[in-house]
Image: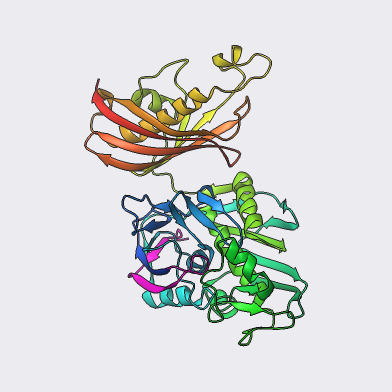
């Protein structure tokens, strides 16, 4: 049986319009990306802005829409674009924006989906990351709850409830394929209530909403226009869910039942699936402890990386640290309440980054990595005996012998620590 291929665009797609929540005029370009690049947003209007990977760890807000990024380098309302890309099984695409939000079009994913279909989808090198559950799980977030079961493909069963005569209670079940998305979901438009208009504007939301791009609900019906389907509302909520599920970073095979889904709930669901699912991904390079000891000068008790499980040469690395009660630092930190020192978590992260650098130079046994600065260090949760830390580092800049990297350490799918590093490769 032939292995599945990764997909990118055949040619560039360009769309322009207004952002739903920011009200900003924007031009968006969907650009073919290299194999293993993944899906990322890039703000071309911000000098030196780093690409924002479309993963759950980049989520910074979920109020009425999903926002990725940090500080000024953010992108609002990513879910419709991501849903269209997911329907086409696109793995590697760079989404360039000269503003803070993709154009909303008519409020649906149709424009992006159709433009991608016209541009074409191309297979290229590498295997797609696939996400598979080993057992069923339930996720609750406020009034929202989800039941997820293992499956061979992705099926979404969604139920919504609103006290409005056009909605009331609606349910729909959708198999996610390109053809089914085109027929049943792509034209489903976003909606909002006229009674909420002032409060949304006061919160900085819906500044670009209009009758041309939003189904506006009055007390008894629609402010303008007609529905594409009587249950268009639940169909659009399914599009939102699909877009948020893309933040898993791989193609999901599961049967998901969602009751009253929200963006906050969808993100909680993605985090839960990430903790309990199996990620099948190409491993172009795996290093055990012997290979690590050949590359790094560290030795007991300061060698803090056990295994390298993934490398995208010059771009990204994933390493594992298994934390046991036998670690020598637990004798003093703290005997009755063992917690891994934060400085050693950062050191382990740095050593993982050092492995990426050693793989990018000639004669690595003759080199050593000196770290010049560590910035933006944040600790999100304690690390205790029995935890496994998964360190994911990406290369932000590499020129000559100097580089800048950003890393995050995860425990059970949740960030435990993050930091940025400046490093230099020197001769031993």
Q: Give above or below for 139 relative to 209.
A: above
On screen, residue 190 versus residue 5, left or right, reads right
On screen, residue 10 versus residue 147, left or right, reads left
Q: Quadrant of the C terminus?
A: top left
On screen, residue 218 versus residue 286, left or right, reads right
Q: Give above or below for 50 relative to 333.
A: below
Instruction: Give the colour scheme shown.
Output: rainbow
Image spot of residue 300 (x, y percent): 46, 15
368 and 251: which one is in front? 368
Query: Which residues fall within the magenta stretch?
Result: 1-24
As for residue 261 lying within the magenta part, the answer is: no
Residue sitting at x 64%, y 51%: 268
Image spot of residue 226 (x, y percent): 63, 87
Q: Give above or below for 264 relative to 196.
A: above
Image spot of residue 335 (x, y percent): 65, 13
Q: Can residue 175 be seen in this view?
A: no
Q: Quadrant of residue 24?
A: bottom left
Q: Can residue 239 be seen in this view?
A: yes
Q: Quadrant of residue 44?
A: bottom left
Image spot of residue 48 (x, y percent): 32, 49
135 and 188: which one is in front? 188
As for residue 11 lying within the magenta part, the answer is: yes
Image mark count:
0
Residue sitting at x 61%, y 22%: 339
125 and 389: which one is in front? 389
């Amino acid at each position: 049986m032939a292995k599945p291929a990764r997909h990118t665009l055949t040619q560039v797609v360009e769309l322009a319009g207004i952002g739903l929540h920011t009200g900003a005029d924007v031009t968006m370009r969907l650009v073919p990306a290299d194999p293993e690049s993944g899906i990322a947003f890039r703000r071309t209007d911000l000098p030196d802005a780093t690409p924002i990977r479309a993963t759950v760890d980049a989520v910074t807000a979920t109020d009425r829409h999903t926002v990725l990024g940090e500080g000024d380098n953010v992108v609002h309302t990513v879910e419709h674009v991501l849903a269209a890309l997911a329907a086409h099984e696109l793995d590697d695409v760079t989404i360039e924006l000269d503003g803070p939000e993709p154009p909303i079009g008519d409020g649906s994913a149709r424009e992006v989906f159709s433009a991608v279909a016209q541009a074409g989808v191309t297979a290229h090198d590498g295997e797609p990351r696939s996400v598979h559950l080993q057992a069923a799980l339930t996720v609750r977030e406020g009034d929202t709850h989800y039941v997820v079961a293992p499956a061979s493909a992705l099926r979404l069963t969604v139920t919504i409830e609103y006290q409005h005569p056009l909605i009331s209670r609606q349910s729909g079940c959708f198999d996610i394929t390109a053809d089914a998305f085109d027929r049943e979901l792509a034209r489903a438009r976003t909606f909002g209530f006229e009674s909420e208009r002032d409060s949304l504007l006061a919160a900085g939301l819906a500044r670009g909403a209009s009758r041309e791009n939003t189904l506006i609900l009055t007390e008894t019906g629609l402010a303008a226009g007609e529905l594409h389907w009587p249950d268009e509302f639940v169909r659009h909520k399914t599009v939102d869910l699909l877009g948020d599920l893309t933040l898993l970073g791989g193609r999901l095979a599961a049967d998901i039942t969602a009751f009253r889904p929200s963006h906050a709930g969808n993100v909680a669901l993605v985090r839960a699936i990430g903790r309990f699912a199996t990620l099948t991904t190409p491993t172009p390079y795996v290093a055990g402890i012997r290979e690590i000891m050949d590359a790094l000068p560290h030795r007991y008790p300061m060698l803090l990386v056990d295994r390298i499980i993934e490398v995208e040469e010059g771009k990204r690395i994933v390493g594992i640290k298994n934390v046991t009660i036998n670690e020598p630092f637990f004798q003093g930190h703290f005997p009755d309440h063992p917690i891994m020192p934060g400085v050693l978590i950062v050191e382990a992260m740095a050593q993982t980054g050092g492995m990426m650098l050693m793989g990018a130079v000639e004669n690595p046994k003759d080199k050593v990595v000196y770290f010049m600065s560590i910035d933006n260090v944040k600790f999100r949760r304690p690390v205790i005996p029995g935890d496994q830390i998964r360190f994911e580092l990406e290369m932000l800049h590499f020129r000559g012998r100097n580089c800048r990297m950003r890393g995050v350490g995860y425990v059970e799918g949740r960030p435990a620590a993050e930091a940025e590093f400046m490093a230099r490769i020197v001769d031993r």
